Image (cartoon, rainbow, N blue to C red):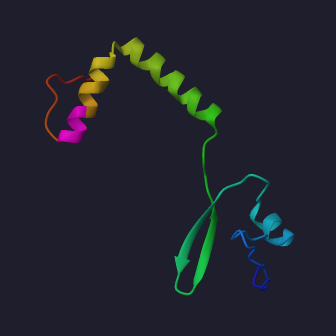
Amino acid sequence: MDQPYVAKITSKGQITLPKPLREALGLADGDLLLVYVEGRGVRLEKAAVSTSEEFLDLARRTEVRWRNQGVTAADVEEAIGWARRGDEPSSTRTS
């Protein structure tokens, strides 16, 4: 789409993207956009975000896998501490 479009900024800083642009980019109500500054302009990209349902499903599957592998809450806390400190954990899992 090389054709320029005009969009007005409201007093709240909102912009309405013309319908042909939204359709060409597959944008729908509620979609999120990433905005990048490029010189004197901006570049917009559709943000790829997961829904809360997708996150909860991932959390459930992770919990089941860890339980099956014998990973405890203490193991997770130790791994987080290790990552933050940059040292070695007291035990090493291989599963």
Please give the name of the residue rendered at 52% of the width and 86% of the height, measured from the top-left corner. 39
Where the C terminus falls, by quadrant? top left
Which corner quadrant of the image does residue 70 belong to?
top left
Q: Residue at x 60, y 48 (%)?
A: 49
What range is drawn magenta here? 81-85
Q: Is residue 56 above or below residue 18?
A: above
Q: Is residue 76 above or below residue 43?
A: above
User: Eyeballing the image, is 91 above or below 15?
Assistant: above
Q: Position of residue 31 (x, y in %)?
A: 71, 54
Q: Quadrant of residue 56?
A: top right
Image quarter in which the N terminus is found: bottom right
Would residue 51 appear left or right of 39 to someone viewing this image? right
Indicate whether residue 7 is drawn in magenta.
no
Image position of 33 (left or right of 6): left
Q: Residue at x 79, y 85 (%)?
A: 3
Within the image, what quadrant is residue 94 found in?
top left
Is 81 or 21 nearer to us in this picture?
Answer: 81
